Amino acid sequence: MGLVVLAVSAAGLAAVPETVADERRYLQARPCPGSVPAPTENCLHARTAQVAGVVIRDETKHEEFTLRLRAAPGLPEEIDMGSAGPLLQHLTPGDEVTLTLWRDYTVAVARDGAVQKTADTPEGEAVFITAFVLAMTSVGVFLLHTGGSALARARTWATYGIPAVLVFRTKWAFGSALCPLPALVLAALSGLGPVAEILAWCAMVPLVHRYLRWKSDRERGRHARPLTTRAPIRYTTTNRSSRRARGAPTATSATRTTRRASGWS
């Protein structure tokens, strides 16, 4: 399972450079010299369309700002506008609008001098893909490591139970999977894109580990299982009368048995 998740992460990471390049081409795009260029050309062109309907739902748990168009060759039937203003809320069925297209993206809608950018642009796609890749990497590494440990120490875990360190690693993996969210915000604010996002994530993951270790040290009681890799030491008291009969010392003796297993101390 871990290998599958890591394979998905690798495929997403491979798509990031091309996505960054597309975003740069879009930001540098200029109006096309022809009226209807090829869909693969890196230039902006305009098309007219008629409004078929408008959907505006601005609720706490559900938001939808959709512009529906009458069917036309080469044009989408629905456009995610991202917000109600400044144009969408004033449109009615039958209105004629001007669409600005770049490749297969509808990047803006205009009518009577009012222009509204849509949510259908390549801007920001790279940082979202990177965030997904980083989250999946955290999960994949955890599943791969835990699965390997379970296979290697199946009998030990069955005898002594799940080690405390596994609980710690689960929390660390969960925290690492959440780190891409603040990293995405930092990347968007800095404008440095996926590179800044990856660096921020790499800095946050060790901090999460240190915080969880500090919290574990504070919350563990004297009898809690420590997060170490040594096995428990067990002492067995022998019968005193039997030892007297054999002429052995009467003090309590202890037989020390040590079994090495990951997760116990």
Image: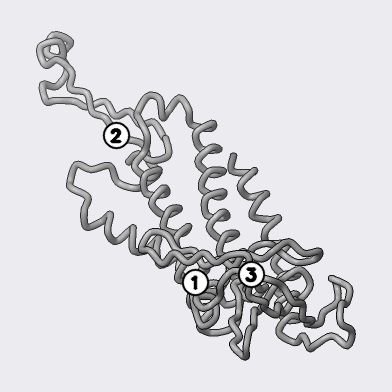
Which amino acid type corresponds to the residue marked 1 in the rendered image? Ala
Residue 241, placed above or below residue 157:
above
Mark whose residue sits in front, 3 or 2 = 3
Mark 2 surroundings within 10 Å by alpha-carbon count, few (fewer than 14), some (14 through 19), many (20 or more): few
For residue 255, which quarter of the picture?
top left
Q: Quadrant of residue 236?
A: top left
Residue 76 in percent (x, y) is at 71, 64
Element carrying mark 1 = helix
Kindly identify the amino acid type of the residue bearing the numbered disc 2: Ile
Q: Which residue is mark 2?
A: 233
Q: Residue at x 35, y 39 (%)?
A: 264
What residue is rendered at 68% in x and 62% in y? Answer: 77
Residue at the location (38% across, 40% down)?
Answer: 263
Q: Nearer the viewer, residue 177 or 34?
A: 34
Q: Can you give x and y, in whole percent of width and height, for residue 185 in the image?
A: 48, 75
Question: If you read the primary sequence from the N terminus, does the residue marked by circle 1 or circle 2 appear first?
Answer: 1
User: Residue 220 appears at what percent x and percent y?
Assistant: 22, 50
Label 1, on which residue? 183
Q: CA distance from mark 3 to mark 1?
A: 39 Å
Residue 81 or residue 134, whichever sits in front = 81
Q: Earlier in the sequence, mark 3 or mark 2?
A: 3
The reply, left or right, for residue 31 in relation to residue 154 is: right
- Classify the position of the N terminus by image quarter: top right
Look at mark 3 in the image and give the residue it sits on. Answer: 51
- Residue ranking furthest to the bottom: 113
